[in-house]
Structure formats: C-alpha cells, structure tokens
Image (cartoon, grey):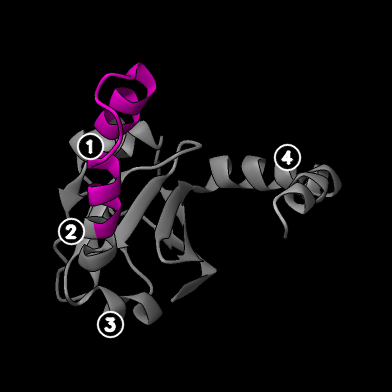
Amino acid sequence: MFIGEYQHNLDTKSRLAIPAKFRSQLSGGAIITRGLDRCLFVFTSKDWEVLAQKLMALPLTQADSRAFVRLMLAGAAECDFDTQGRVLIPDYLRKYADLKKEAVVTGLYNRIEIWDSEVWSAYKKRTEGASEEIAEHLRDLGI
C-alpha cells in the first residue's frame, strides 16, 4: 500500500528519488506511464498487469477506449532504479507532466503519482475548495 506525500527534486539528469517507504514494494519491478490531470502514474509490475488486461478488454471500436489505451500503454516505460533509489523519468513523460525541478510523489494505495510541485499545489487548492461538492457526488456512489 502506498500512502503519503513527499517532496523531492529532479536532478540534472531527470532522475527522481522515490521515497524509501515505497521502494521495497517496487522491488519486483515497476512501470511509469502518463497519468491523468497532468501527473505520472507508477504501478508495481503486478498491478500494471492487472490494469493492462482491463485496458485490453476495452472495445477497440470505441474512439474513447482507443484513446485511453494509447495514453496509458504507449506512454509506459519500465522503471529502473539506481543504487540511490532514483528513477530516470523519460523525457516524453517529464514533458507530459510538465516536471521541472521540484516534484511531489504521492501514494494512492495501489499506485504512486508524480506531480510537478506547482501543478500539484494548484490541483490541491482547486480540489480542497470543492471538497463539499465532491463529497456530495461521492455520496451518490455509496461512499
């Protein structure tokens, strides 16, 4: 289980340290890909396989399905960690998430998200400002 929010910096080679608490869970391999809301998703290899199978089951004939599958699968890369627990963020993913120097690494139970610090701050501010409205919608989902 991944939980928490951590501040880290990208180095000059586009490497990002993954929090030590998360590394042991990723020792069996990890996949990084485009996420939603301008962030990156990191999955364990096991959870990635589950997600990939669900994506491949989406109807090929629907444009939205094809687009989402392309977003997630075509953008995926295997994570290789160095001895200091850093992962190289491929250039196309760094540009997608608009990652600059300061990044936020968040744990969301079965995945990690990587955000540019400024983008994360703006997202959090918007979300916190709409928390009552969001809670009302979640009630409709039984939460």
Secondary structure mostly seen in magenta is helix
Q: Is residue 131 left or right of residue 50?
A: right
Mark 1 and mark 2 in contact? Answer it, CB < 8 Å. Answer: no
CA distance separating discs 1 and 4 = 27 Å
CA distance separating discs 1 and 2 = 12 Å
Mark 1 and mark 4 in contact? Answer it, CB < 8 Å. Answer: no
Q: Residues within 10 Å of mark 2 (few under 14, many from 20)?
A: many
Q: Which residues are magenta?
A: 50-70
Q: Which mark is residue 75?
A: 1
Is residue 24 shown in magenta?
no
Q: Give the residue type that dot 4 points to.
A: Arg
In the image, residue 140 lies at what x, y percent? 76, 48
> Which residue corresponds to the image point at 63% horizontal and 46% vertical from the top-left?
121
Say if residue 14 shows up in the picture.
no
Helix, strand or loop at mark 4 = helix
Q: Give the residue type that dot 2 points to.
A: Cys
Q: Give the residue type that dot 1 points to.
A: Gly
Residue at the spot of label 4: 126
Mark 2 and mark 4 in contact? Answer it, CB < 8 Å. Answer: no
Comes first in the chain, label 2 or label 4: 2
Q: Nearer the viewer, residue 80 or 66?
A: 66
Residue at the spot of label 3: 24
Helix, strand or loop at mark 3 = helix
In the image, residue 36 lies at what x, y percent? 45, 39
Is residue 69 shown in magenta?
yes
Q: Is residue 100 above or below residue 24?
A: above
> Which residue corresponds to the image point at 30% horizontal and 78% vertical from the top-left?
25
Res 39 quadrant in image: top left
